[in-house]
Each structure stands twice: as structure tokens, then as C-alpha cells.
Image: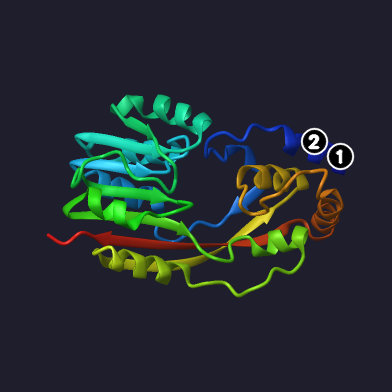
């Protein structure tokens, strides 16, 4: 058995750039929503003339969907705000002639009106529905898999203690915002997905990578709480948390 200190040190040393979660194989698992994001996006890409992926991270998921699509859109574009991810995305999407713009998550999009018939986003931190509606062509769609309120509340409370307030119906709020921007909501779904962490090193790496779970996270600040998580994993075999996901597809009227 590896010690608490060894596991924590490993989790603290792993690079966090991009959205490649392959390091977690054998150490953590997350149930996927039933709609299958990559296949769904690949299907939409196969019929798109111009595609824009917002907050693309390192472009990993977008590139995989492009590779699976029946045909490539004539224009492939993406946005990203974090410079290390920006460089990764530009390299990864070069195969498809992708242009990747550096854009703040809450900033305006540097594209003309009606430029894309498909806009996608997976786990965006902010959604500028006014800008999404503006860059969509008439009849075009925005497809988004969002993170629902209450995601990893169990994990956050293990470090922070009980959190105030009830979880919000995040998908419903996104649908309201989409309609307020003049879009028609054609699909709205939600899913609660089980997540298992099998060692505390995986917990440390996850909290460093998905920074909004515990915004002030550091190993030293939360060492006692991490030690308790480690004891729970030794006792139960895994630390179980839950992620909330919603899917929304909104279309610009013709």
C-alpha cells in the first residue's frame, strides 16, 4: 500500500494543462451521461458548414468529435481563455485547419454575425447567450453539455464543511437564458452521474485541475481533510461523489 504522503505528492506533481483525463485511468471513474456527448457532437459536425467550439480547453474533445464526423465542416473554429490550453488547442486542431481565438470566457466573440451554423460548448464556465445567438446563422444550433449545480458537492463539503443553499435547476436556467436571447430550445435533458476516487492522489489532481470545486485548494491548506478522505478510501475502497450534467440544444429561428 502506498502511503498518504506518496499519493498526495504524486497528485500534486501531475501537470494540469488541457482536458485529457487519461491519468485517472485505474484511479478514478466517472459515469457518463446517457446521451453520449462525443457521438452527438460528431453527428452534428457531419452536417455543419461552419463550426465553433467555445471554451475548448486543449481541443481534445472537439478534435475527437471532428475525427469521428462523417465529413469536416468547411470552417472549424474554437475559443479558449487559458494560454497553456490555447497552445494545445492550436496544435491539436491544426489537422482540421482550425482557428483558435484567445477569448475571455465572458467576453464577446471575435466573429461576424451569422458566421456559424453550429456552436458547441462542453462544460462552459460562462455562457454568453447574446453572443451565441449573434454568431449563429438562421436555422443554426447551439449544442451544450453543461455542469449542473451541486456537481461534486459531496467532495467540496468533505474539505469545506456543509455548504449553504440548495442546488439550482441549472438546465432550466440555461433554457430561460437561451429563450431570452431569442433562441428556440429544442432539447433539454439532465443526468446525475456517479464518480469514484480510488486514491487520494486522484482527489488532489482532480481538485488542482477542476479548480472551481474548491477554489482556494492547496494540499497544505487542506491536508487534514485530505487525510480523512484517504482514511475513508482505505475503509470503503473509494470516495464517492456525484456530478450533475445537463444537455441543451437551442436553435436560432430562420
Tell me the distance, in whole angstroms, between the alpha carbons under discs 2 and 1: 6 Å
Label 2 residue SS: helix
Q: Can residue 52 be seen in this view?
A: yes
Residues 74 and 231: in front is 74
Q: Is residue 1 visible?
A: no
**At 66% from the left edge and 56% from the top edge, which residue is drawn?**
196
Provide the residue designation for mark 2. Answer: 9
Q: Nearer the viewer, residue 220 or 75?
A: 220
Q: How crowded is mark 2: few (under 14 residues within 10 Å), some or many (20 or more)?
A: some
- The residue lying furthest to the bottom in this view is 166
Residue at horizontal 30 percent and vertical 36 percent from the top: 77
* Residue for badge 1: 5
**Residue 92 percent across, percent down from the top left:** 41, 28
Quarter of the image with the C terminus is bottom left
Q: Residue at x 42, y 56 (%)?
A: 145
Q: Do the residues labelled 2 and 1 touch (CB within 8 Å)?
A: yes
Relative to 233, say whether 94 is above or below.
above
Position of residue 89 measured from the top left corner of the image (x, y, whole percent): 43, 31
- Quick one: which residue is furthest to the front in this view? 108
Residue 200 is marked as none
* Quadrant assignment for the N terminus: top right
Splitting the image into 4 quarters, where does residue 12 fall?
Answer: top right
Q: How crowded is mark 1: few (under 14 residues within 10 Å), some or many (20 or more)?
A: few
Left or right? Give the position of 20 relative to 186.
right
As drawn, is 102 to the left or to the right of 178? right
The image's colour scheme reads: rainbow
Taking 201 as reference, is 228 left or right?
Answer: right
Q: Residue 62 location, x and y as percent? A: 38, 40
Q: Position of residue 197 (x, y in %)?
A: 70, 52
Amino acid at each position: 500500500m502506498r502511503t498518504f504522503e506518496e499519493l498526495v505528492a504524486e497528485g500534486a506533481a501531475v501537470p494540469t494543462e488541457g482536458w485529457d483525463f487519461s491519468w485517472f485511468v485505474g484511479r478514478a471513474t466517472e459515469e457518463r451521461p446517457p446521451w453520449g456527448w462525443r457521438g452527438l457532437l460528431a453527428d452534428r459536425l457531419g452536417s455543419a458548414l461552419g463550426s465553433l467550439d467555445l471554451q475548448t480547453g486543449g481541443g481534445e474533445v472537439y478534435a475527437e468529435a471532428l475525427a469521428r464526423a462523417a465529413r469536416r465542416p468547411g470552417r472549424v473554429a474554437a475559443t479558449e481563455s487559458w494560454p497553456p490550453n490555447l497552445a494545445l488547442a492550436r496544435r491539436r486542431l491544426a489537422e482540421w485547419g482550425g482557428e483558435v481565438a484567445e477569448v475571455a470566457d465572458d467576453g464577446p466573440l471575435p466573429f461576424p454575425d451569422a458566421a456559424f451554423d453550429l456552436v458547441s460548448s462542453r462544460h462552459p464556465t460562462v455562457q454568453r447567450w447574446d453572443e451565441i445567438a449573434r454568431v449563429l446563422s438562421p436555422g443554426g444550433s447551439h449544442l451544450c453539455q453543461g455542469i449542473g449545480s451541486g456537481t461534486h458537492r459531496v467532495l467540496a463539503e468533505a474539505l469545506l464543511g456543509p455548504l449553504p443553499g440548495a442546488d439550482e435547476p441549472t438546465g432550466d436556467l440555461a433554457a430561460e437564458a437561451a429563450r431570452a436571447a431569442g433562441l428556440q430550445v429544442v432539447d433539454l435533458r439532465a443526468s446525475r452521474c456517479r464518480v469514484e476516487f480510488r486514491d487520494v492522489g486522484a482527489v488532489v489532481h482532480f481538485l488542482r485541475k477542476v479548480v472551481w470545486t474548491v477554489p482556494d485548494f492547496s494540499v497544505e491548506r487542506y491536508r487534514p481533510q485530505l487525510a480523512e478522505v484517504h482514511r475513508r478510501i482505505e475503509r470503503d475502497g473509494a470516495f464517492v461523489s456525484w456530478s450533475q450534467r445537463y444537455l441543451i440544444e437551442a436553435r436560432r429561428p430562420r
